[in-house]
Amino acid sequence: MGNSKSGALSKEILEDLKLNTKYTEDELCKWYESFQKQCPDGRISQAEFEKIYANFFPNSDPKGYARHVFRSFDTNNDGTLDFREYIIALHLTSSGKTDLKLEWAFSLFDVDRNGEISKSEVLEIISAIFKMIPPEEQKAPRLVPLPSGYLSGCYLPPPP
């Protein structure tokens, strides 16, 4: 199952996306056309994905976080996102069901994909998120205590 490298979106993928997202057939077809223009081979690489993220966060370093987001949506581990994976990512992060968002959040934090989230994995993701904050807003972070038994605390930027 996959996207054809040229031509229209396959009926199988279209029906799957209509069933599993909030998007209409018309929206999906328009996005597919745009996706094919941007990614003629029908796939987006991790490097291309990171560039897209960089455009949204020009005054920070989103590369680490983008890498983790990409990994969490590259469901077949082939190092690329096809149109289906891309739309599922868009849907989950913008309007997906709560249980699916929680599954995605878990997969984001489960860096080594072993089914468990370690303290080092949480710190890795939090660090990647922190790097997305512009440098001038990162100054003088404050320590926020977390419930006992979790982490000793998280560094957050000072309040405005």
Image (tube, rainbow, N blue to C red):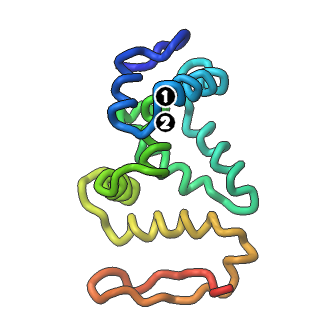
Q: Amino acid at mark 2?
A: Tyr
Answer left or right for 69 relative to 158.
Answer: left
For the point 61% across and 85% down, the residue is 141
User: Is residue 31 placed above or below 71 in the rendered structure?
Assistant: above
x then y, percent, for residue 2: 40, 20
User: Is residue 124 placed above or below 58 in the rendered structure?
Assistant: below
Q: Judge by depth and name the residue closer to the eye, 114 or 133.
A: 133
Which of the numbered marks, if any, corresponds to residue 103?
none
Q: Which quarter of the rendering shows the N terminus?
A: top left
**Residue identified by numbered label 2:** 86
> How far apart, in angstroms, are the residues tagged by discs 2 and 1?
5 Å
Rendered image quadrant of residue 45 = top right
**Residue identified by numbered label 1:** 83
Q: Amino acid at mark 1?
A: Phe
For the point 61% across and 81% down, the residue is 157
For the point 44% across and 51% down, the residue is 95
x then y, percent, for residue 77: 38, 35
Helix, strand or loop under label 1: helix
Q: Judge by depth and name the residue closer to the eye, 27 or 52.
A: 27
x then y, percent, for residue 114: 26, 53
Helix, strand or loop under label 2: helix
Answer left or right for 111 relative to 81.
Answer: left
Badge 2 density bin: few <14, some 14–19, many ≥20, Cα 10 Å: some
Residues tagged 2 and 1 counted as in contact (Cβ below 8 A): yes
x then y, percent, for residue 70: 49, 44
